[in-house]
Amino acid sequence: MPVETSAEQPLPVRRVSQLVTQWVDRLGAVWVEGQVTQLTRRPGQATVFLVLRDPVADMSLTVTCHRALVDVLAGGLREGAHVVVHAKPRFFATRGTFSLAADELRPVGVGELLARLEQLRGVLGAEGLFAADRKRPLPFLPTVVGLICGRASAAEHDVVENARRRWPAVRFRVEEVAVQGPAAVTEVGEAVQRLERDPEVDVIVITRGGGSIEDLLPFSNEALVRAVAACRTPVVSAIGHEQDAPLLDLVADVRASTPTDAAKRVVPDVTEELERVGAVRRRLRAALGTRLDREVATVRSLRSRPCLAEPTSIVDGRQEGLTALRDRGRRSLSSSLERAADNLAHTRARVTALSPAATLERGYAVLQRADGHVVRRAGDVRPGETLRARLAEGELSVEVGSGAAPSTPSG
């Protein structure tokens, strides 16, 4: 039952420790599976200390057992081994620590490991982690290749040397980690995350040489497989040899049979690419030559046509028509000008005949007073008045004599 407490009625530390101890004791003995990450055997002591790690949850528990349980195992017990222990949980109230006291210890055999891997394969496959439609294509020429490998390993040498032999300018970002043992899963997973965060890395290669099933177990670890599945950067798996098939091969975007094969997949061969470029250039040159020959034949065919063979024939025919039109235009214009000149002469003659100047030409004169009025009757002027006589050529000033008398209109 829950313990009732309050700020006014708190529990002392010893009471909390006692309650935790009681709860742990009620749990009873349990079977626990894990990976041995630390094995401590002190000389002269009958107790052996183990640290069991859960690779998926990245959690550990301390296990104590009698030395005889470890000594009776065939081949002994080593770090990195998978074991199943029957143990009683214990909580030490005085130290505030939790551990397992094992009374039975069993190593997980190869058959059991393979069965569990097959079960894990089915679970991950059902989730779609191995589906072909989620795999990303590799870049044609990566800027930087991220390489995860063992420290000073032959696999690293194979990948780097073969890649540089194919494309000398290729750049690598190498992450040297533990590729077997209890720390392999953690170190490989962290290296994957570092390369995934690097914007220059275009492809990640995870590689190591061959080994036993136990040696390659980290690359079938569920946590590592899920970390690779979550990567946005394409991942190439090159683990072991052709016959080795860890789960990492299934989740990776590309599976390489060997580290050398991984180098061939991540970068192109400069010799082959130059040969392809040369072949393309030859095909382009041949296609261009064929196109030019076809166009030259078309031009020659056009040039053989009459309109292009003798282009002046059209101009000559048009020139005759243009000359005839020009002559007709000139004749029409001349005729129009002559008729207009005749009409103008006749009009001038009529105007001249009707003009007062013509009357003056016959010897008449026009008399005008000083104010410009024309004198029509003798009675309109006075003796001594000066008048202006307008002749056909020039003018005269005349004075009216005293004998002038007004004219009497005839009846």
Image: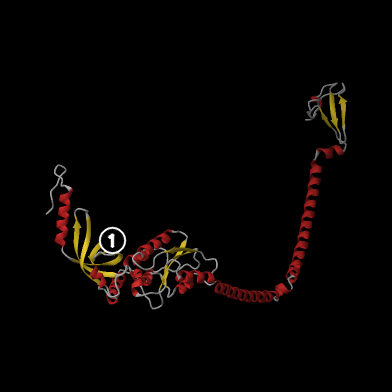
| Picture layout, residue 396 above or below residue 227 | above
Nearest the eye: 354 or 180: 180
For badge 1, the amino acid type reads Met
Q: Residue furthest bottom?
A: 243
Position of residue 202 measured from the top left corner of the image (x, y, whole percent): 46, 63
Left or right, residue 111 beside residue 407: left
Nearest the eye: 233 or 317: 233
Q: Which residue is mark 1?
A: 59
Left or right, residue 352 beside residue 126: right
Q: What residue appears at the point 80 percent right and 40 percent down from the top-left corner?
A: 355
Image quadrant holding the N terminus, namely bottom left
Q: What residue appears at the point 39 percent right and 67 percent down from the top-left corner?
A: 179
Q: Residue furthest left?
A: 1
The crowding category of the residue bearing disc 1, from other C-alpha atoms within 10 Å (few below 14, some 14 to 19, many at least 20), is few
Left or right, residue 329 beside residue 185: right
Secondary element at image label 1: strand
Position of residue 215 measured from the top left corner of the image (x, y, whole percent): 36, 72
Task: Tell me which corner region of the image, top left, top right, bottom left or bottom right, holds residue 220.
Answer: bottom left
Q: How many marks?
A: 1
Left or right, residue 69 beside residue 322: left
Position of residue 158 measured from the top left corner of the image (x, y, whole percent): 48, 72
Q: What residue appears at the point 22 percent right and 60 percent down from the top-left corner?
A: 99
Image quadrant holding the C terminus, namely top right
Task: Tell me which corner region of the image, top left, top right, bottom left or bottom right, holds residue 64.
Answer: bottom left
Position of residue 162 measured from the top left corner of the image (x, y, whole percent): 51, 72
Q: Residue furthest front?
A: 44
